[in-house]
Amino acid sequence: MVPFDFEKVILECKEYSQNMSPKDLHHGFEHCLRVKNYAVEIAKRENADFWVVEIAAY
């Protein structure tokens, strides 16, 4: 397993959320799910451990 960069995930999630429409941001739960799913995708790309991603996504 490669080291997992929490700050990178947080930064990328923030950038990702900035690209969402106001309608998407209005639905907070859906927004959180999308950001979490995006964090999982980042981790897959980085070959990180899934459980580490679960922690990073919250």
Image (spheres, grey):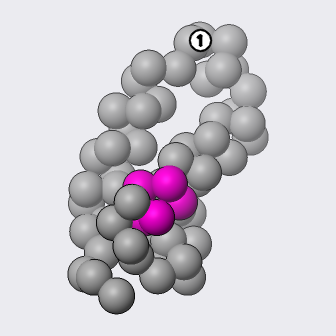
Q: In the image, residue 45 lies at what x, y percent?
A: 39, 60
Residue 19 visible, this angle: yes
On screen, residue 46 versus residue 51, left or right, reads left
> Does 46 sit left or right of 29 as displayed?
left
Residue at 50% over, 54% down: 41
Front residue of 13/3: it is: 3
Please name the residue shown 30% across and 75% down the image.
4
Q: Is residue 44 above or below residue 18?
A: below
Q: Nearer the viewer, residue 16 or 25?
A: 16
Q: Quadrant of residue 35?
A: top right
Furthest toward the top, the residue is: 22
Residue 36: give x, y in percent of width and height: 58, 53
Q: Residue at 68% across / 46% down in the picture?
A: 33
Q: Badge 1 is on which residue?
A: 22
Q: Position of residue 3 (x, y in %)?
A: 25, 81
| Mark 1 crowdedness (10 Å alpha carbons): few <14, some 14-19, many ≥20 | few
- In this picture, which residue range is highlighted in magenta? 40-44
Residue at 26% x, 68% y: name it: 5
Q: Is residue 12 magenta?
A: no
Amino acid at pointer 1: Pro
